[in-house]
Amino acid sequence: MNNAAEQKLVLSHLWVAFIAFVVACLLGEYQVLERSGLFPALDSTRVYFASVSTHGVLMAFVLTTFFIMGFGYYVAVSSLKQPLWNLPLAWISFWIALVGTVLAAIPLLTGNASVLYTFYPPIVAHAAFYIGATLLVVGSWLWCVIMLVTFGQWKKAHPGAPVPLAMFATAANALLWLWTSAGVALEVLFQLIPFSLGWIDTIDPGLARTLFAWTLHPIVYFWLIPTYIAFYVFVPKQAGGYLFSDEMARVAFIVLVVFALPIGFHHLYMDPEQGQGWKLLHGIGTFVVALPTLVTGFTVIASLEIAGRLRGGKGLFGWILALPWTNPMVLAVILSLLMLIFGGFGGIVNASYAMNAMVHNTAWVPGHFHLIFGGTTIIMYIAIAYYLWPLLVGKPLFSKNLALMQLWTWFIGMSILTTPWHVLGLLGQPRRISTVVYNNLLTLAWQPYEFMMILGGLVLLGSACLLIYILAKTQLAPAAEAFTGEIEYATPIHAVSTLPEYLNGFKVWNKVIAVLMAISFGFPILQFFFMDTFGSSAWGY
Amino acid sequence: MKRLLLLLALSTPLLANAQPASQIAWTPAMLNLVKKGNAEKGKQLAESCKSCHGDQGQGLKAETQDGETIPAVPALAGQLATYTFKQLRDYANGDRSNETMNGIAKNLSEQDASDLAAWFGSLPRTVGATAPIKARAEKMVALGDGKRILPPCFTCHGSNGQGEKMDIPALAGQQADYFASTLLAYKKAERHNDIYSRMRLIAQQLSEEEIKELAVYYQQLK
């Protein structure tokens, strides 16, 4: 991609994402320090919950949305080899999302939106928080439109030709996000904004939680898809090999998009407002969505094995050592998969009703989502940034060794942070607490783990700062020579010349999603309008 | 005879639950009534409150005159409107007892109570006289006492003693004498308009000394 205007667009998105990221890391370290209770000077419930809310929103909504938008624009232009459809609209989308972020940040930082990053009434934030979050989502919807129009235009201009895998997956993510965000959009527009502005006196928390569950699970796949895109389209080439199967990758993305949506009730296993039958249905769906992850794990490892053997690796495991571990993308995928194995295991625990009952609302849950999101997902965002930055700024990466060190420290820090976090959950520490004040033997037993978490957080904060340093240096430092590399998408072992329409588009899948969503959420939502339920008044935080 | 005894035994819970702690339920209608309280009207009504509750709703400390103790009067400035409203209605309904206040509250309509609550809620809180704060009180506020299953005060009353929805009172700047006598009244169950005995259960666990220390702590909180 040589178009300066589009490069600027992508860089702007990625910078917003990574600045949000480093600020959130700083807040994260404060939180582990405060929660440990080892530093009385830091103790403040009010500051803690303002911080944890800001941290969650920055990481889960700002970092992800801006990164996905920026990365999507880059993939669209570079894989389809055509200019972006409607660049001005892309800038409008960027500014709407940024204004929304700033608007939401004001109540967050002043302690008027300390509701965590989940939208669970009757706890209610200042209206500006919800309006800001809505603008961020509206900005991302414009991105979805741009992606899907670009996708459609290319298909029209190339009838019968397979859409490049990277763009296929990006369009899948745009479709997924439109479906995903509809749940929370309904909750915010019809419940939270009117409630926070005082237009309605009460709110139905059951309906709100059901609508949020609609969004809460697929949103993690929205975050995860760029990681999988990197797995499939960058990693095999960077490792010196080929993609094991292009078709299998498409199947994985389709199953991911279709089954990520109708399964949100595993977040509501312990809630009273939904019946056991619906929970069982969603529970089964949750296990189905583990399939594309298994397929991805298989395909990526197979691709890596091809690369390792092409590089001369022999024996059952010798190919692993033969991989180019000093390539940031390859190192990142190895570390990402390691974290995926443990995080995925934790996810199966969460999805299983009986085991979920034991870890529900304990520290296990944030431990799990930090490992799988902060670990598996974000380490690939970072690797993508290292890969794209030289292409975007036209200068070589400032230091490959520093980048490798940064990826290792991110992995080590995340392991030190999340392992004790899981253990704390098993020891019964509740989540969403700011202090531990019960002073008995059980809580004393938590302290060594709290201390480990401080250390893990510190390593992660250092690693995040190093990332920003490397990216800034790459962009700002005078380069001795211009970087002339081109983006390289992996080629499959067996080139794909034709594909059935169901592996090259989403029309049929969109209908399948509509049917599945109607089955999974139709009655569970409508019941709130049939039943004589009583709304709740707002309560404080 | 056996049947009669059985009937009496089974009827005991009825006696125990004969009267709720308070008649005030936070329905949307009730909350809206408080929300729409007219502070200007409340200001006019509050003219007659000044003699006891002070010009600025700052309350009075306990005094001894001619060998007789005049009890402390609570600070109302900056109090949650919902809390003030509930107390006025509880006095009117007889769920809270105070000779003077029962009589006054009975002559106030619900709207009057709402207006007064709005007016006192709009006044700035005053910070009381300084006395040394005991570390034990600070610990109770921030950490509670696990051994006695006492939660930290701040979990309900807020980290700055600002009170919380719906009717958990603000304690910051409260008259220490009044604070202490109120907790003692809860301790002895002389006051009982706390829903679910929330404060009674806590106050029973506190020593008189601890209550006095907490009173000093909260009076000085801004």
Image (cartoon, rainbow, N blue to C red):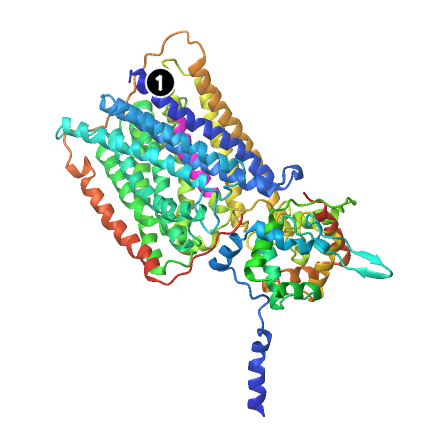
Is A460 in front, or is A407? A460
Left or right: where A82 falls relative to B40: left
Residue B4: image x %, image y %? Answer: 57, 89
Q: Is residue A314 visible?
A: no
On the question of residue A433 being in view, the answer is yes
Q: Position of residue B198 (x, y in %)?
A: 62, 61
Q: Is residue A182 left or right of residue A158?
A: right
Residue B121, image x, y percentages: 60, 49
For disc 1, the marked residue is A392
Let me know if residue A61 is in the magenta part. Answer: no
Question: Could you say which is closer to the camera, residue A123 or residue A231?
Answer: A123
Instruction: Point out the image quarter for the N terminus of chain B.
Output: bottom right
Residue at the right extreme, as displayed: B66
For this view, does B132 lie left or right of residue B205? right
- In the structure shown, which secondary structural element does the residue marked by tag 1 occupy? helix
Q: Give the amino acid at mark 1.
A: Leu
Q: Which residues are magenta?
A: A367-383
Q: Is residue A172 left or right of residue B49?
A: left
Residue A180: which quarter of the image? top left
Q: Quadrant of the C terminus of chain B?
A: top right
* Residue B72 higher or lower than A155, as above or below: below
Q: What secondary structure prevails in the magenta region?
A: helix
